[in-house]
Amino acid sequence: MPDTTTVSESTSATPAFPMARTCPYALPEGYTDLRGKEAPLQRVTLFDGTGAWVVSGHAEARKLLADSRLSSDKLNPGFPAISVAEKAHRPFRTITELDPPEHDTHRRMLIPAFTARRIQEMRPLVQKIVDDCLDAIIEKGPSVDLVAEFAVHVPSMVICHLLDIPYEDHEFFQAMTRKITQERGTLDEAGIKQVLGETWGYLDRRVTELENEPEQGLLSLLATERVASGTLEHHDLVAMALVLLVAAQETTSSTLGSGIVTLLEHPGQLARLQADPALWPNAVEELLRFTSVADMGTRRAAKEDIEIGGVVIRAGEGVIIPNLLVNRDPKVFADPDTFDVGRSARTHLAFGHGVHNCIGQNMSRLVLEVGFQSLFTRLPGLRLAVAAEELEMSPAGGVQTLTALPVAW
Amino acid sequence: MDVSVDQSLCQGAAQCVRSAPQIFDQDDDGLVVLLRQPGSPAERAAAHVAAVLCPAGVITSGGPA
């Protein structure tokens, strides 16, 4: 069987992808190998034996993410799926999977809720949420799991406020978003269908409630201004709610957890921040670069042949642009594996690039800045309660997150 | 070369407003608005940073100085 021979030859020559992280911020060994190759695009082998391109160059990543010849549509047969679950049929599509012009129509409905001004107006609310959360932690202390007690809760409370989702439902939706993102690479087809079905059902009911009795947040606004006027289908609003909930919850909570460990493991950098709090916004950019939790969020399928970095991506081939890898390109970030809160890191691609860049990025920056700064101000003696080597990361393929973060003070 | 923006491409990431609030703003729809041309070298540099950081290639800038 010549086909089988071809596949086995290609798999033996190219590394398997995705690759697991064992530390919140250190590159998996396989990433170091990919980065060490001369060409900024390399072939890898996916779970089903098919191949895809992995991009390690920051410049190439920027070009490709802004290239309309690449599609985000998972229905495209060349899209690089990383598990059986991702290939399972779904009765809806979210904005992250739509290409322009359909993407742009939906994105423009969301943009007004995420302007720089609107986000700044939320600062007192975010500060209050963080302060209340820290009060509870200090009351409960002097040792807690900061993933469960802080990193997961703070983003949830902000999202509930933004979207009109009742906070009393947090245990349910936190469990759902965790499965959808962290277990993306390991759930089977029935597992992903069940979790997406339950989440969809919940949000479908919630959006219906808000269509009938609107409240103050974004889902109510879209229900009254868009669904009521016929410019957005109810179904599409539920899909928007799903992607906003999942993306906001998991990426922000993962970055909070991984960022705390990064700071604790680099006490000299933390001391710089304690001495000069004006450095925090810059430190947040460096933490985003250094932890790059949404590592597999940027994947595409080529619609046409694309010449780049000395190779040709053929129409129909898959392209993976791991944020962690491109954010450690030494051509752009000197000494890239060094954590330096004073460096200029703003060109990192942790929020992606091109039309699909993260719409919640400034909300995320706000939550991270207030969260980190308040935590280390209130608990200056914070330390890990276990050896750093004992901390566990979620499985490869999903948003990369700590499963727990035991600390003491 | 003057700074220019193509609002039709804007995706509302607000990197321009964060980088150079004296040069760029967002309208009621959250889309980029060019307030005025940069004057000082510092403003030109800030506008250039905004152009580099804009994820949607909305801003054309003549360079840092």
Image: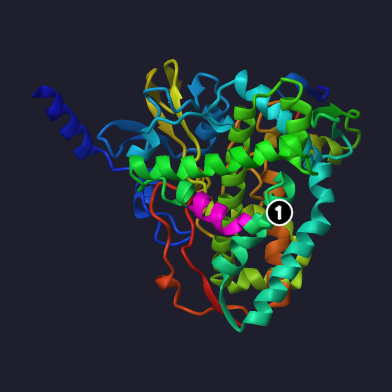
Circle 1 is placed at which residue position?
A: A158
**Residue A118 drawn at (x, y percent):** 82, 43
Instruction: State which region is magenta.
Output: A169-178
**Residue A357 drawn at (x, y percent):** 62, 35
**Residue B36 drawn at (x, y percent):** 91, 28
> In percent of the image, x 80 and y 35: which residue is there?
B47
Above or below residue B46? Residue A109 is above
Query: Can I make out residue A123 in this image?
Result: yes
Q: Give, as a three-letter code, the residue at label 1.
A: Val
> In percent of the image, x 70 and y 33: which residue is there?
B54
Above or below residue B34? Residue A148 is below
What colour scheme governs how the chains and residues are painted in the rendered image of this protein?
Answer: rainbow
> In percent of the image, x 28 and y 31: which residue is there?
A50
The foreground one among A337 and A348 is A348
Chain where mark 1 sits: A
Q: Main secondary structure of the magenta part?
A: helix
